[in-house]
Image: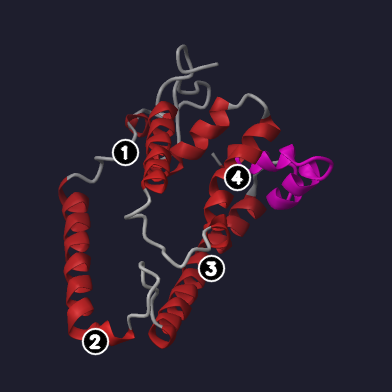
Amino acid sequence: WATVITNLLTAVPYLGPSLTTWLWGGFSINAPTLTRFFALHFILPFAMMSMSSIHIMLLHTEGSSNPLGTNSDIDTIPFHPYHSHKDMLMLTIMISLLLTIMSFTPNIFTDPENFSKANPLVTPQHIYPEWYFLFAYGILRSIPNTLGGTVALVLSVAILTTTPFTHTSHFRSMTFRPLMQMTFWMMIATFITITWAATKPVAPPFTT
């Protein structure tokens, strides 16, 4: 999958092949590529922890937004013990669920192909990425053009970042906006459908 994902850069006009070679550190995936991505995955958790800390600090100093768009300073309550107890309960449930899965059914989400004996001469007929990448794989597979698939994949993620700029109303909640509710659930249904279709083999009717 590293080859598939990094090869998406080749779809960039003019600069694509050069960017791919620079990212690989050579003309194919080799030791420098693995070192770079290992370093990236090592640094990312610390970057995410830093951003989360900044977010919590700003939340503590500035306060959270009200879905109704009104000033609710008079309705505030202390974070502890009200919210801290709720957060600890949810954290305990999540950790317990994770430990249960790891202890009793560690292979519940594992692809059966991983248990097959490796054979460098035979490629499995139907392979697909982990479930959290299936939507991206489904988008790439549904568009035969490499550039078109890459653009669609980037836009599918980038469009979520436009919400703070396009939704400027002080009233943030969708409670009284049936059209927005319908749009939201259509997006969820589309995401689930693309994810489900990506698990199917590349054969009719799952090909265009």
Q: Nearer the viewer, mark 4 or mark 1?
A: 4
Magenta residues span 5-27
Q: Is 71 in front, or is 166?
A: 71
Q: Earlier in the sequence, mark 4 or mark 2?
A: 2
Q: What element carries label 2?
A: loop
Q: Nearer the viewer, mark 3 or mark 4?
A: 4
Q: Position of residue 39 (x, y in %)?
A: 57, 63
Question: In the drawing, what numbered circle is on residue 78?
Answer: 2
Residue holding disc 3: 43
Q: What distance separates the C-alpha of mark 4 from that of mark 1?
A: 29 Å
Question: Mark 3 packing: few (<14 Cα in 10 Å), some, or many (20+)?
Answer: few
Q: Which of marks 3 and 1 is nearer the N terminus?
A: 3
Question: In the drawing, what numbered circle is on residue 110?
Answer: 1
Question: Mark 4 packing: few (<14 Cα in 10 Å), some, or many (20+)?
Answer: few
Q: Earlier in the sequence, mark 4 or mark 1?
A: 1
Residue at image coords 64%, 43% = 6
Question: In the drawing, what numbered circle is on residue 155?
Answer: 4
